[in-house]
Image: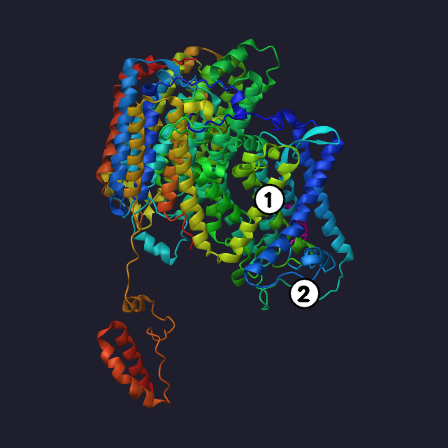
Amino acid sequence: MNGFTIATPAQVLAIDVRLPDLDYAAMAPMLVLFGAACLGVLVDAFAPRQSRHTIQFALSFIALTVALLAVIREARVGSRELTADVALAIDGPTLFLQGTLAVLGIVALLLVGERALEKGGPFVSQAAIPVGSEADRRQAREEGATEVFPLTLFALSGMMLFVAANDLLTMFVALEVFSLPLYLLCALARRRRLVSQEAALKYFLLGAFASAFFIFGMALLYGFAGTVSFGGIHDAALLATTSPLLLFTGLAMVAVGLLFKIAAVPFHVWTPDVYQGAPTSVTAFMAACTKVAAFGGLLRVLYVAFDRARWDIEPVIGTIAILTMLVGAILAVTQTDIKRLLAYSSIANAGYLLVGALAFSKEGLSSAMFYLAAYGFTVIAAFAVITLVRDDDGEATHLSRWAGLGREAPLVAGVFTFLMLAFAGIPLTSGFTSKFAVFGAALGVGEAWPVALVIVGVVTSMILAFPYLRVVVMMWLSEPAEQSPTVAIPGAFTSAALMVGVLATLLLGVFPSPVLDLADRAAEFIR
Amino acid sequence: MRFLTQDPTLADFGHDPWWLILLKIVVAFIFGMSMILLGVWFERRVVARMAVRPGLNQVGPFGLLQTLADGIKGILKEDLLPRTADKVVFFFAPTVPAIFALTALSVIPFGPMVSIFGVQTPLQVTDVPVAVLVVLACSAMGIYGIVLGGWASGSTYPLLGGLRSSAQMISYEVAMGLSIVAVFMTAGTMSTSGIVAAQAGGSEASWSIFGWHPTVPSWYAILLIPSFLIFVVSAFGETNRAPFDLPEAETELVAGYMTEYSSIKFLLYLLSEYVAMVVMSSIIATMFLGGWRAPWPITAFWSGANSGWWPLLWFLAKVVLLLFIFVWVRATLPRLRYDQFMKLGWKVLLPVNLIWILLLGGLRVMQDEQFSGRNRWLIIGGAVVAVLLVALLWPARKAEPKTTLEEQMSARPSGSFPLPPLDLQVPPSPRAKRVVAERRPANVTASGAGSGQVADADTDADEKEV
Amino acid sequence: MSLSAYVPILALFALATAFTLFSVGISQIVGPKRYNRAKLEAYECGIEPSPEPVGGGRFPVKFYLTAMLFIIFDIEIIFLYPWAVTFADLGLFGFVEMLLFIGTVFIAYAYVWRRGGLDWD
């Protein structure tokens, strides 16, 4: 301060500012996505209306590709480090899951950017306009919202941060960064707008509750360990001489926040409504990417911070896993809406993933990561098919409308049949290999809980096969209904997404070993 | 900079004996109340003089006791409780702004260390490291009284007035909050006495004009003039004073949030407005005008001006000057429209503020970091280019396409009410055929113009009906 | 810095509360009470007051929007204050961080501006 030489009382207080070391290369995927999302907001503010969609899609696509390349580069280098003052852990699982997120994000982005199926795209530009008003009729002719692209990128950057977060505080910030855009995305459906907004509100309110639980648990854990970093909590649990009450209460509350995101029973009640109400492309994005991110976070919390408390938490989370599998499978049988059916199937799949996670072994970790990748591709492809089956009111999601679809559109019905078989875990699909890997890992531990979980898993898989096969039977063997929906001709984007999803499902079922090896090599957390 | 012995620091607070605390808060309270009585008189008197009227001159010497008489009369009036009102909230809402406006007086520095009954103590009720935040919090809490009072009245005008007022106050709170960031950056503290001490200044600049080192001005009103101007403007908005007195725009909202109030509760709202004005004046004086320090020409020939009880005089003089400006503005400027007002707050004050903060921060960092001459110019040039680019690329709003009268007419949905002739010609009365005959040539000559044709058609229609 | 410096603020708060409650209370006692049904109606320029639904009814969404914008910028200000006070110590690093932060909020601001969120009518 030369020009204004004004000494201040505060200068007496010498403040020691310690600058964190930042490895920009390791953080590049997140930074690229975040920067592109900010740029996308500006594009939306300043670009002319008719060119926004093109610019936004190109920007998002390029950003995701660059992020994927950055992850691959980082994986080639083989970096294993804590950066940003131990707030971020760049290790095998982080890179594997970030890569998965980038790829699944690109595929989901193709669905989000599709405009061939509906004039103006599946999103509405001003969701707050009352349905049926004069302004609403005018809006029906207009282009849809292009804010979905920056929102998707924000969500993806949050997810990438979430799987890399190495302390509870960063994890919470990431949780909010990826949740808030999802709440918004849910509310933007052009068709059945009130259902969509209801879904968004439910998701938001319950999500806010879950976040509150998470942050309260974080406070308790801080009270126990005196730090929020996972390594610190691990050390504190190891050395603790005091009562572990704070530890377990805190863990339980943090777990509520995370189990909410992965839709485990009894924190699953939002899932069917949100999956049904949200625009289908957003549902696909949530089903694939949110699951990857939330499980990535949960795995890190369990394996890094709480592996010492394993014996205490196994019964609780094991019970939750059993409930999740049972409730998901049994309620899936009763569904009559295809999106709700997939929602319950996604709940059951969360249960299978928990089986892998509870193995608390390297195999458990790698099989869970493989499962996440395989399931993500299949579920995106399944929702892509759902966007194609339409009638005058948009997508025809009631199961009875799908009857006899095999005669009308054998190709689409065939693809969907293949995906249903993959969900059911039939060999030669990724569903089989991933379930096999997860159950195998659990059996490999050779203890009571994992074995019990595997038994429940196999039984529920058989139950769950029924609703899938019912859809297949309905499509091929039933007579078509009177007003059967038409199958729209997919645009290039949806075709590409569908092709990637189906090919991945097939390849991961037939030649799973490269990806399994990759997951296996990556399956080691650093602390 | 020299810390003189009479400059209070944060360490000097919190040691007063209980009787001194009591004395101080009572004096501060009396100061607030007497400033209301005098302030109302002052305002009415000054406004009257500006309108070339005598103003208050009946009750007491120079009409000084008029406000007191009004207050006593207010207490003796009937206190109405509207049937639709929310009883409890309606009863307590008027107390809220008054309470918090008075509480804000507790951190205003009135003077340096003085001796009161043998105890060395600062002439200030108290000071805390976040004193300015206390003032901001108090002014924000006052909004509750207004919005709750408007809501609890159970009536349309007060509800709208309360909403408008809260929207207005929170909008200007943003501008106000941002404008003092520059003060904190320069002073390095949020305590009011610290900010006054930081403005003692008077040091020589390191840069020179032909070997002459000018004395850097120490008042933040000069040093940080954008912040000062923005703070003053937002202080007007924050206190609901003219030209920003939209919540009580009588042409639109009767009396705004106060419509249903009567008796002392009505007076409490008025009272809180004046206390808020006094607090804002004191804060402006403290943060931008050197606080209780004597202005420059006095200090030049009288070294004792800043010690003892004299600073109280300078402080009061500054506050009265600022109050005069409040009144002067009210007497001069018309009230803004609501959309203009919000536009000023959000689209002008806010971005200007942010850019100013960044500019100031950038300058200070460059001085601290000792960049070489070339790098410094590179950075400055880069920043200038960036600002210019943003300014150039910021798309100007497209001018509203001008539509002709015919287009506007045809754009009206069918079944709309009939319009009067658009060129404001009075349609001829059917009884006055002669007038029509006289007017006809004028219409024929104007038939080339669009509006003339419309009017022509109208008159034709009128004639046919006849 | 002990908390005792905060006591006078509370004391002045108590004094102001006592004063206002006293003055409101005293006017209840000394003021006249003359019941008149018309006097207790809500005032609406002399016409029959419009009946209002319970809870104050609905009002324009603009106010909510202003409130949300206020929260965003108020939080920005809250972050700016500690930075401003320790500005001299944080130096270039702090300045660049704050530049990024203000820039990010500014992006949102530009978006809201362009989308008409700051226009009032």
Query: Alpha carbon of mark 1 to alpha carbon of mark 2: how far?
Result: 45 Å
Place of residue B239 in the rendered image (x, y in percent of width and height, measured from the top left) = 55, 48
Same chain for the residues under marks 1 and 2 in the image: no
Kindly identify the residue that appears in the image at 69 percent across and 66 percent down.
Answer: C37
**Could you say which quadrant of the image residue A382 lies in?**
top left
Report if residue B95 lies within the magenta region: yes
Place of residue C65 in the rendered image (x, y in percent of width and height, measured from the top left) = 46, 47
Residue C39, label in figure: 2
Task: Please indicate, yes or no, whether residue A459 appears anywhere in the rendered image.
Answer: no
Q: Which residue is denoted by mark 1 in the rendering? A: B317
Q: Which secondary structure, mark 2? A: helix
Q: Is residue A348 left or right of residue B51?
A: left
The three-letter amino acid code for the residue at tag 1 is Ala
The three-letter amino acid code for the residue at tag 2 is Lys
Kindly identify the residue that appears in the image at 76 percent across and 52 percent down.
Answer: C26
* Observer-nearest of C33 and A411: C33
